[in-house]
Amino acid sequence: MRTTVKDSVDAVCRAAKAAAAAIARADSARKNAALAGMATGLRGRSDWLKGENRKDMEAGKAKGLSPAMLDRLLLTDARIRQMADGIEEVIALPDPVGEVLKMRRRPNGLMVGRMRIPLGVIGIIYESRPNVTADAAALCVKSGNSVVLRGGSEAIHSNTAIAQILRDALSANALPADAVSVLSMTDRSAIDVMLAAEDFIDLIIPRGGEGLIRSVAEKSRIPVIKHYKGVCHIFVDEDADFRQAVSLCVNAKVQRPGVCNAMETLLVHEKAAQGFLPMVAAELTKHGVELRGCPETVRLVPQAKPATEEDWGTEYLDLILAVRVVGSMDAAMDHIRRYGSLHTEAIVTRDHARAMRFVREVDSSLVLVNASTRFNDGFQLGLGAEIGISTTKIHAFGPMGLEELTTTKFIAFGDGQVRE
């Protein structure tokens, strides 16, 4: 009888579900030993990995992939070492599984608390970068989860080879290889089947552009961690330190303009605009930033182009910045509520009360005071490695590290208590 795509995907997901119980029970020492084996395997088999990657590179060139896509796809010795180093960084992180939180004694003497536990099986759908295979698998294994990985068809040989090394390390440490699985079928319908596998998969995490994430969210019958885009703002308040504000704005826009935590819109209090805008515009222009501003911005900064309504909600991922002068902090927060993406927002101010109000009232996965938006990153916030940034609030908000790949269950300790 002919095996269908559904049969193949379900078989992988069913095996991952079976493996999840063993990974969840594994202690830190065994998981860390398996992770160490993964890092050693990646370094030791780099020539084989590069050979498998060449197959993808040749196919990608034949298909006419862009130079940027080919660069993301390429595995070099340095990138393989980085994957191995990343796994070793995960080894050094505290294991969250089994942590007991908030134990309290009830009036009847019952001790009630919570224990951190794995989510179960995590499905990850991603594009281009083969390093995601190793990064995601390491985080899932350390947090006691199984993972089903579905990378782009352009990286199928690379992803399959990396996963084989990771699976070998699991087996060598008496852990089930199926805790790390790659869907090897490149048919797009495999994603649809995966998104309907609610009996096997507990959470879906898509990694890629807005189009991929929206498609996954629309089709999935499984909870999805979403991060559509990063329309990030800096608000320069009326009493801001202008020199500090210029430095922060340049860093937030220029350091890496193509990432989700780069600033896309600058909001400036009208009382600061005349002194601050020409100063920051001159510095941004030196770095090749194109400014698109409201009428007051264009008046104060002649090189700025008039902004359109579309500019306020655009994630440029480029050296382009929308600039708006606002009449108050309330107006700035209203703008953020209307056009923001719940990703990252910052205020530059010397007024503590206003800073704290901004922190309380702005709805975003990270709100900063007098710091660049570029800090919304797992490593920068002290989580170690991250699996992505969530702009949903259930069950995680912001960078997702090991703790965010777990949940908690209630536990209770009694001494013969019965309910009256």
Image: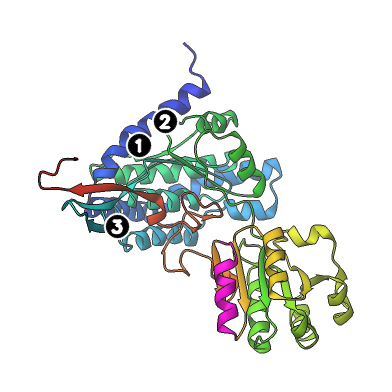
Label 3 with label 2: CB-CB less than 8 Å: no
Q: Residues within 10 Å of mark 2 (few under 14, many from 20)?
A: some
Q: Amino acid at mark 1?
A: Asp
Q: Nearer the viewer, mark 3 or mark 1?
A: 3
Q: For the point 73% across and 76% down, which residue is it?
A: 328
Highlighted magenta segment, given as a residue range: 351-364
Give residue 283's position: percent from left, percent from top: 74, 83
CA–CA distance in space, label 2 to label 1: 8 Å
Q: Circle 1 is placed at which residue position?
A: 178
Q: Is residue 419 left or right of residue 185?
A: left
* Residue 240, placed above or below residue 230: below
Q: Residues within 10 Å of mark 3 (few under 14, many from 20)?
A: some
Q: Circle 2 is placed at which residue position?
A: 12
Q: For the point 59% across and 70% down, which residue is it?
A: 373
Q: For the point 54% across and 70% down, which residue is it?
A: 375
Q: Is residue 33 left or right of residue 236?
A: left
Which of the two discs, 3 and 2, labels the residue nearer the N terminus?
2
